[in-house]
Amino acid sequence: MKKFINYLNWSMLAGSTIIVCLFLIVILIELFSKGLPAITIDFIFKYPSEGMTKGGIFPAIIGTVLVTLLTTAFAVPFGIACAIYLGEYAGNSRTTRLIRAAIRNLSGIPSIIYGLFGLALFVQAMRLGTSLFSAGLTLGLLSLPYIITTTEESLKRVPTTTREAALAVGATQFEMIKDVVLPVALPDILTGIVLTLSRAAGETAPILFTGVTFYTSGLPGSVTQEFMALPYHLYILSTQHQSVEQVRPLAYGTAVVLISVVFILNLVAFYMRYKRRRYD
Amino acid sequence: MTNNKKLSTEGLNLYFSEKHILKDVAIGIPQNKITALIGPSGCGKTTLLRTFNRLHDLLDYVKITGKVMIDDTNIYDPKISAVEIRKRIGMVFQKPNPFPKNIYDNIAYGLKVNNTDPYRIPQLVEQSLRESFLWDEVKDELKKPAIQLSGGQQQRLCIARAVALRPEVILMDEPCSALDPFSSLKIEDLIRELRKSYTVVIVTHNMQQAQRLSDYTAFMYLGQLIEFGTTKEIFNNPQHDLTKNYVTGHFG
């Protein structure tokens, strides 16, 4: 009887895992079987033409890359600095617990709210207009709580014995953090950052009101211009186009490109961890 | 005891939040001798050891009252930084904890943060590796990650790291407990060598090790210093019943 229950438990757990994996496989097969035929050199390197029924998605790819770079520039330095302060200096008082809880809650806010906030603050109040800059700042805000949380967790995982080793040879707290704690935590921190950025790259709602546009005739020449982006382009092709049926292959192609970008970012995170592990 | 007291405490009390860990400890640790701190787990010997180089500083729930002195300097004088104290009082930990750096940098790091003249660092690294009997084993692979050394080698590296700063005192928290008997004996030989130039305080659970190694022994129990004397006295002619029971293996 006990053996049977054990087997039942095992099969329920294994079954759940298989079902989840099946969904993933079905999604990927669906996407790639319909999207891959659309992907050609021209699709990657040409502009959309004839009302987006022909041509490629080059400006959307570049737009997504640019806005993600801006997001990185805004969110990473602030996120890491914030996490170091909270994790290493701020201690554990009622106030810091409140701040931590607030940051964790921020990561639960729907992304459309970030979009509206970005519109109100960056686009209108700060008069940055709908632009790459506003969109990058908005995505940066969205990414900050994730970066702070994952970085703080990574710092916390650095063993006390390693920290004490640094203190015992006369390092100051800052030297300890800079020379010993950060290098040890870096692979974990970078992984968190790359995963966060890959999520930001796929977001539509935060850039919807703050800078993305459905068509530009050229690449954005400066951060004050509007831009095209892969997730928004996909949204347009699948819901807003006059002949949705006709552009469906292009939509699937765009989805494949978007998912590939995210997948490559994830591979980068994986590779960084692997490389650091070997050096330790 | 006629020797100079290198480290001393007077009326030392230490609390973890409300918990009274060290109770009115008064001890004078003689210079250039090896002093062993023994006692059952939880008696406060490691806590006492860590009081000497202010390793409790970063924990805000630790409260310390009383005097802790190195020579005539109050270790907890607010005008003195912990960094300054830790340069004078080195420490070796229970588990080898090399930095995630290569062998050379493991030793050079302490020198760098203490503003040693960069030209002197290579020479000091070699010297401290020689003093730790590690030089011959690692001289050809100084750029190898320290983590790839064996446990015993890592612990000797940690001792070299402490020695490199030319401290006055070296604190050791059960430095052999994570090592095999052969590596332990090597470390013990090394500690005996260190006595010539340093004052050594060692926490140990190993009665034989305390007898083999130390000149003086302090027995602690439930946060109190029960008895302190030469190792011979403590092991052969203990004055206190608790000490007698402990060193003869009746409890602990």
Image (cartoon, coloured by chain):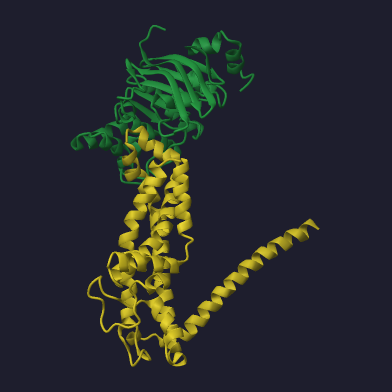
Tell me which residue sits at (33%, 73%) in the image.
Answer: A211
Q: What residue occupies the far front of the structure in this picture?
A: A125
Q: Is residue A4 left or right of residue A160?
A: right
Q: Nearer the viewer, residue B91 or B68?
A: B68
Residue A111, by quadrant, is bottom left
Q: Is residue A71 above or below residue A57?
A: above
Q: Is residue B158 above or below residue A183?
A: above
* Residue B233 rendering spot, x and y as whole percentages: 51, 9
Q: What residue occupies the far right of the structure in this picture?
A: A1
Q: Is residue B192 above or below residue B178?
A: above
Residue B141, by quadrant, is top left
Tell me which residue sits at (35%, 82%) in the image.
Answer: A214
Residue B203 in view? no
* Residue B30 rendering spot, x and y as whole percentages: 39, 14
* Residue A53 rendering spot, x and y as whole percentages: 38, 91
Q: Is residue B225 above or below residue A237?
A: above
Tell me which residue sits at (64%, 19%) in the image.
Answer: B250
Residue B111 in view? yes
Q: Is residue B227 left or right of residue A10?
A: left
Q: Which chain is yellow?
A: A
Question: In the rendered image, which quarter contains the N terminus of chain A?
Answer: bottom right
Residue B242, by quadrant, is top right
Circle count: 0
Q: Nearer the viewer, residue A134 or A75?
A: A134
Q: Colour of chain B?
A: green
* Residue A265 rendering spot, x and y as whole percentages: 39, 67
Q: Nearer the viewer, residue A94 or A38?
A: A94
Q: Is residue A183 left or right of residue A7?
A: left
Q: Nearer the viewer, residue A55 or A132?
A: A132
